[in-house]
Image (tube, grey):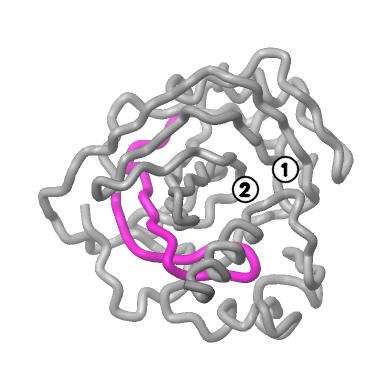
């Protein structure tokens, strides 16, 4: 039990904007993803793990699996610049049911360019919706953005996007998460990890197969605030099966 509680704590800390970092990490220089595993003993899985994320989603096995059961609840949202990404923390009530287990949305954040790829295609922007169940297990829903029309939901958040690290703001008009997602919830599923230190494994990943639109200006605005690419390179599947 103690081991499970420790794993849950590590998983939560890996996605928390407020977690005390045990070692500084980043996306450039000697703190970039290639060095994460050596920055701290706590980050060793970043180098030695066999079920790491992100991945190139290809050769998916066609199966019959349950459709995503998503529920959305309007509530307070806080946008944060944590130095690694721009993250939106949400209040309760947004749930996902997976394998008869209910997960609650904690936050969502963005990577540019995308971390996961679909059939070798990288997208200019990817959102990760981070869900947690009552035992602390994590599930991540990934949404790709392709360049095109301006996204009205992103526009609401970007108007208040903090430009300085550790700056926060309460969104005056919270995003409609349901409207941000595509109407079609077809997805690829695989077992993976956090894409940031400590790279903890055991995370259930779902990558939506249909992208939504964001304008070139919206993508550029995000990249200007983050100031560098914030995607971890692709990781080997090591025999993992991706199901469709």
Residue 118: give x, y in percent of width and height: 37, 53
Please report whichever mark, 1 or 2, sits nearer to the chain's N-terminal start. 2
Residue 36: give x, y in percent of width and height: 69, 76
Above or below, 141 relative to 60: above
Residue found at x 60% / y 63%: 9
Q: Can see residue 158?
A: yes
Q: Nearer the viewer, residue 86 or 101?
A: 101
Residue 207: give x, y in percent of width and height: 37, 48
For the view shown, which residue lies furthest in the left direction? 64
Give residue 200's quadrant in the image.
Answer: bottom right
Q: Are marks 1 and 2 in contact (CB under 8 Å)?
A: yes
Q: Nearer the viewer, residue 5 or 102?
A: 5
Q: Is residue 160 magenta?
A: no
Residue occupied by mark 2? 112
Q: Residues within 10 Å of mark 2 (few under 14, many from 20)?
A: many
Considering the whole magenta stretch, tell me its main secondary structure: strand
Secondary structure beneath dot 2 equals: loop
Q: In the rendered structure, which segment of residues is drawn in magenta?
A: 188-212
Residue found at x 52% / y 21%: 149
Residue found at x 29% / y 51%: 188
Distance between the alpha carbons at the discs numbered 1 and 2: 7 Å
Above or below, 64 relative to 40: above
Q: Residues within 10 Å of mark 1 (few under 14, many from 20)?
A: many
Q: Is residue 205 magenta?
A: yes
Residue 227: give x, y in percent of width and height: 80, 48
Residue occupied by mark 1? 223
Q: Nearer the viewer, residue 212 or 73?
A: 73
């Amino acid at each position: 039990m103690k081991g499970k509680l420790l794993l849950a704590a590590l998983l939560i800390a890996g996605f928390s904007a407020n977690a005390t970092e045990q070692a500084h990490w980043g996306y450039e220089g000697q703190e970039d993803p290639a060095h994460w595993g050596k920055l701290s003993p706590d980050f060793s899985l970043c180098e030695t793990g066999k079920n790491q994320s992100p991945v190139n989603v290809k050769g998916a096995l066609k199966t019959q699996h349950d459709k995503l059961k998503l529920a959305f609840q309007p509530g307070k949202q806080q946008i944060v610049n944590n130095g690694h990404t721009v993250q939106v923390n949400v209040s309760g009530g947004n749930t996902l049911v997976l394998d008869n287990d209910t997960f609650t949305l904690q936050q969502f954040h963005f990577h540019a360019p995308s971390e996961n790829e679909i059939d070798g295609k990288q997208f200019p922007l990817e959102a990760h919706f981070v869900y947690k169940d009552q035992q602390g297990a994590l599930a991540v829903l990934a949404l790709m953005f392709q360049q095109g029309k301006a996204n009205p939901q992103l526009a609401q958040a970007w108007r208040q996007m903090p430009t300085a690290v550790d700056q926060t703001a309460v969104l005056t008009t919270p995003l409609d998460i349901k409207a941000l997602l595509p109407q079609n919830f077809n997805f690829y599923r695989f077992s993976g990890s956090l894409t940031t230190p400590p790279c903890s494994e055991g995370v259930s990943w779902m990558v939506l197969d249909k992208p939504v639109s964001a304008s070139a200006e919206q993508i550029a605005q995000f990249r200007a605030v983050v100031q560098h690419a914030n995607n971890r390179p692709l990781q080997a599947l090591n025999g993992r099966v991706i199901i469709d």
